[in-house]
Amino acid sequence: MSKQFKNNLITYGIIIVFFAIMQTLASTGNLSSLFKGLLVPICVYAIMAVSLNLTVGILGELSLGHAGFMCVGAFASAFFSMCLKDSGMNSVLRFILAILLAAAVAAIFGVLIGIPVLRLRGDYLAIVTLAFGEIIKNLVNVMYIGRDSKGFHISLKDTAALGLETDGQVIIKGPQGITGTPNDSSFIAGTIILLIAVFIITNFVNSRSGRAVMSIRDNRIASESIGINISKYKIMAFALSASIAGAAGALYAHNLNTLNALPKNFGYNMSIMILVYVVLGGIGSIRGSIIAATILTALPELLRGFSDYRMIIYSVVLIALMLISNNPKAKTFLEQHDLRTILRRAEKEDK
Amino acid sequence: MALLDVNNLGISFGGLRAVDSFDIHIEKGQLYGLIGPNGAGKTTVFNMLTGVYKPTDGTIVLDGENITGKKTTHINRAGVARTFQNIRLFKNLSVLDNVKVGLHNDYPYSTLSGILRLPSYRKQEKAMNEKAMELLKVFDLDKECDYLASNLPYGKQRKLEIARALATNPKLLLLDEPAAGMNPNETGELMETIKLIRDEFDMTILLIEHDMKLVSGICEKLTVLNFGRVLAEGETSEVLNNPEVIKAYLGD
Amino acid sequence: MSFLNYCINGLSLGSVYAIIALGYTMVYGIAKMLNFAHGDVIMVAGFVIYTMMNSLGVNPIVAVLISVIVCTALGVTIEKIAYKPLRKATPLAVLITAIGVSYFLQNLALLIFGSDTKMFTSVVKVPQLKLGEIIITGETIVTIIACIIIMVCLTLFIKKTKAGQAMLAVSEDKDAAELMGINVNATISLTFAIGSGLAAIAGALLCSQYTSLTPYTGAMPGIKAFVAAVFGGIGSIPGALIGGLLLGVIENLSKAYISSQMADAIVFSVLIIVLLVKPTGILGKKINEKV
């Protein structure tokens, strides 16, 4: 069994064990309703973190607009489900189709945005991805789409401008967004999507395409010199990352009655939040991203007892974590007192 | 016909003429040296041959194919591989993976096949591993195959870079100062390796080098570059005894 | 309102962006970091002035001066506590820390002042100017003049003083500057001090224009100023001015003639187009990797 295979099994194991524990706690009534409500968001943000890790850790480009892809996926899938809500289609099948659609639409956006953006480097790339994220959020907020017997109507002005027949229904109402999306998301659905996302990304990383992407990250010029098509693999990784974020968006949208694009959920603040998960979990570490996303999504809720102080504590924890993890003295201390090191030392002494 | 035919190659950066009317003709299987003082334009020639820079004028023909001004990726696929003066490895990849990236274009299973681990993935990955290990063995790197490239000692990093270049199955191998930073022992070993590559892979090699022991020891022909122009060319011993060349190196 | 009026208002908003962008660009040039908390310093300045004027009845000019002092101290303190220990860390670690500082400032303000919007009394007491059709408010006049003065002073400071030259040297090559006997830490502190002081002035002007204040007031202008800095070429002082002014004018004109809801989208689209044509901004230096 290869080291890498074992590593992946541990990740899958952690997800499944976490799922089992939460499910047992919930069914025995030991989970507060507040925490129960957090289970799907935890999956959403874990999937987001895993997918952003592909861009930041594997492709090595800093993206500050990842929430934009989630937004695209959320709206595309919610729109799809709204259209088929009364068609009598099986809700599980409809949800699966909605997720696939979300992933596909987000991937298209990933390619369209990736082509111009990936020519830029470093901070310039970061700011342009941020800009794209904001543009997506902004456009969703001025978009009105309705449907009547004649088909779909789109406007960027208001509901009246749609010119719907009397039997018409407005599906996307500009800043009011989409109301009445079927509640198809569940903790189990979220866990399954997360497992699939981890499966796709780890397998991608360990294939020839993934190696090509990492070679570009490590040394673009050398990578070109051995015949790697730089743009193709950059865009591939970016689009794959976007499509998984789109799937997370579908999960997010079907967990809410009303979906609107706010700075809070799809703005750059959210993109940055996801980046925080990735960095704290360890850049390039899929498992780390999941654990960091889970803890940091739950943390503000766990700190509810401190009510007003919780966000301050959160920010202080964040700063302290960065300072400690980058402090050479703290690093050596942690390494010396790491459980594995202690065990290894004990083993040696035994011999 | 020669494997590499370069005629009247030149490039200007702004007003600066970095390389001017450069000609070189390399036969298949030759071990050819490109020498000259610092700043003479040797690496610039390499960069034009590999498409990093677009030449302002002149033509580069490899084995009958005109590759002048083509993209680096295309030129590599046409059959030119190189190493770099300042080592450029994929530092965070394992030694084995560094070589496997070089094999990328010879094992073209699809991305989807890779994600779903289809039979084509398993078969080709296995073949890739074998091929890569074979190459690593030639360079005595097979024991370090799981190391991160950045953890290799300097001399081995240089070797790995050559192994990676060879993995792309080139017709022509360009080595940019392969002995830079090596001690005499390592250089001696490197000379053996370069000869071995030429014989074992039936390779044509063009190398830039300052170490005269290496140059006189293994190169069959030399071209000397000075101030962007060819100063002399011919058999190694002839060129090294050319008074013009000695003057360029030692000054007046 | 006439086209010219929109342009003048745009220049006024753009001047504020330019002043904030200066802070971004200077810190980026020297510490090579994106100081995400920069926008929140603006908000802190707003609250300091608000408290001084409303609760303590201090004269507006004095209130602004106090806010400059407070923010300068704040900027230096943030740098000492949060950024200095990370000099050798990855740029991402520093970015995340800056985000942490930004959250901290926002939530501290939230805790002290609550989330409701405060009415901000303008600190500018200059009467408006009427030129036929065109009306220029006192705030606009003061903002534009302030921006010009700051630009001139800053350029002179960097060109003519020893400290300014030290800043240039550090931004060029930190290690070489240190070997030449420049106190790198002091120079970085000075940069943060100047940037934060400028942010305080920008805060006073911004709040006077919009006459409202919340803990999140600084966030969006902060991002826009960052965009302006990139737009003009990050690290370049004239670039920050040009980027800021252009951004302000484009934003105001789109609000007036296209759609107020789409103004941000348009601003960001222009940024993207500029960067695609000129990947390092209008006045940015092109960096080629040596092979």
Image (cartoon, coloured by chain):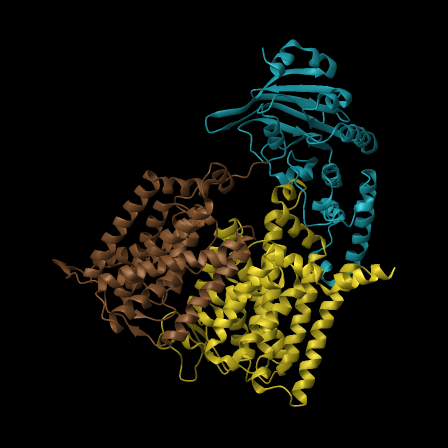
Between residue C12 and residue A81, name the one nearer to us. Answer: C12
- Relative to B251, say whether A256 is above or below: below
Between residue B140 and residue B11, name the one nearer to us. Answer: B140
Tell me where residue A39 appears, x and y as whole percent.
Answer: 60, 79
Which residue is situated farthest in the left direction here?
C132
What residue lies at 66% left-to-right and 57% top-to-bottom?
A332
- Relative to A173, say whether A105 is above or below: above
Question: Can you tell which quarter of the image residue C197 is in?
Answer: bottom left
Between residue C129 and residue A243, name the one nearer to us. Answer: C129
Disc tally is 0
What residue lies at 55% left-to-right and 71% top-to-bottom?
A249
Chain assigned cyan: B
Where the N terminus of chain B falls, by quadrant? top right
Tell me where residue C46 appears, x and y as whole percent.
Answer: 32, 66
Which residue is situated farthest in the right direction here?
A351
Where the C terminus of chain B falls, by quadrant? top right
Q: Say left or right for C130 vs A71.
A: left
Q: Say left or right for B57 vs B96.
A: left
Q: Say left or right for A44 vs C228.
A: right
Which residue is situated farthest in the bottom direction here?
A29
- Relative to A317, say whether B19 is above or below: above
Q: Is residue B138 visible?
A: yes
- Relative to A82, say whether C285 is above or below: above
Chain assigned brown: C
Between residue A181 and residue C9, name the one nearer to us. Answer: C9
Tell me where residue C284 appears, x and y as whole percent.
Answer: 42, 44
What residue lies at 59% left-to-right and 57% top-to-bottom?
A326
Chain assigned yellow: A
Q: Say left or right for C133 vs C247.
A: left
Q: Is residue C205 visible?
A: no
Tell me where residue A102 appears, x and y as whole percent.
Answer: 57, 70
